[in-house]
Amino acid sequence: MLAARTGSSATKLDEISKLRKYSVNSLNKERQKFSQDSRNSTAIQMWQRFQRLAIVRASEMNWYLKVYDLSLEDTVAYQTRMIYRNLGKSGLRVSCLGLGTWVTFGGQISDEVAEQLMTIAYEHGINLFDTAEVYAAGKAEVILGNIIKKKGWRRSSLVITTKLYWGGKAETERGLSRKHIIEEIVRAMTYVINQGMTMYWGTSRWSAMEIMEAYSVARQFNLIPPVCEQAEYHIFQREKIEVQLPELYHKIGVGAMTWSPLACGIISGKYDIGVPESSRASLKCYQWLKDKIISEEGRRQQAKLKDLTPIVERLSCTLPQLAIAWCLRNEGVSSVLLGASNTEQLTENLGAIQVLSKLTSQIVNEIDSILGNKPLGKKDYRS
């Protein structure tokens, strides 16, 4: 998705020249990043693949800007430096960082703060906003919609995702029956897409086997398959995103939209000396999180976070920024959903995009060595 604004008076030839120069500069930066791994065949293949994709993307942008008489400076990507990726192998372009509403909207924060967070996110190029019918008993969806209406943002510039299953208390308000989905949100998956009410559908917290079964049924009955899976992913939760989903991505095009990059705040550093009263873990309904933090495993995780301090200092970033950038560096991740309870936190987390370019293969290997939890893929098992 390429959001653009009109108003430039520069000639088409000048703009195309600028675009080509911009693309070449981007390629040169990536070439420098991979040059230190030039003896590694995998790194060379990655660079060649990136170069081909970059050339194709530059050509697509060239054509788009020329046809619609736009300049590169008019694009949101240029103005905000936000990175946009395809959602799986679909044509939908989403910002690599999205804003989630779980716990915060309609619960932990006021409507005013929610509006401030969405405004900051939108102004920084985020076009993906995630919610669910169960968040704050339906209030999160209402707040999200009211803010969009108040701000007057173009609906075409936004990607709104919601989740269905837990609705109300009645028997007909739960599950994935056609009755529940139609009455509570929009329409049952394929039906709603055919009716033009939504564009894509995906799964959330499904196993790889369940996703593959859904894809097979869709193909068998000429229906529309899912394009993404929303799953938890952070430095302490890696198996599903790094081992299971990549195979689905390459076989059927299902991408990953990940949540909780800071492990519900554990990686933020605020729990290193206990559980603050104002934190999420202090809420009654999050006793499970508090128990996890004070457990023996929780203490081990806090120790590993401290071991990452030298890397944080070397990259001149914060621990949350490093953790989010670490999630973004995974090629199968289309977008990482951020959760924030205040504007300072969101602004800090958005800085992870600048850290992403600093994560060389050497630093990633160093992080893996500290964590000691890199999952084994099929090739590793065979070897």
Image: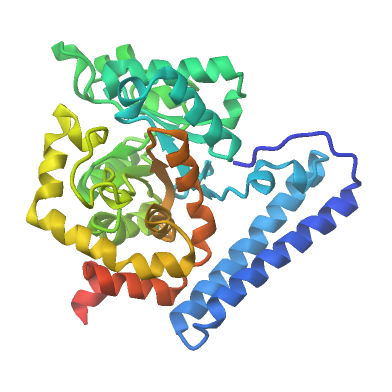
Quadrant where the C terminus is found in the figure? bottom left
Closer to the camera in the image, 214 or 260: 260
User: What residue is drawn where x is 48% and y is 30%?
Assistant: 117
Closer to the camera in the image, 150 or 208: 150
Q: x, y (%) of residue 315?
A: 47, 66
In the image, 130: left or right of 272?
A: right
Visible residue check, residue 338:
yes
User: What residue is drawn where x is 58% and y is 48%?
Assistant: 82
Q: x, y (%) of residue 366?
A: 34, 75
Closer to the camera in the image, 103 or 304: 304
User: What residue is drawn where x is 63% and y is 70%?
Assistant: 29
Q: Is residue 327 above or below residue 79?
A: below
User: What residue is drawn where x is 41% and y is 22%?
Assistant: 192
Q: x, y (%) of residue 160?
A: 46, 29
Visible residue check, residue 377:
no
Q: Hey, which quadrant is residue 7 in on the image?
A: top right
Q: Hey, which quadrant is residue 174 in on the image?
A: top left
Closer to the camera in the image, 112 or 235: 112
Q: Is residue 242 above or below residue 360?
A: above
Q: x, y (%) of residue 58?
A: 69, 57
Q: Is residue 222 above or below residue 19?
A: above
Q: Hey, which quadrant is residue 32 in on the image?
A: bottom right
Tell me the colour scheme of the image: rainbow
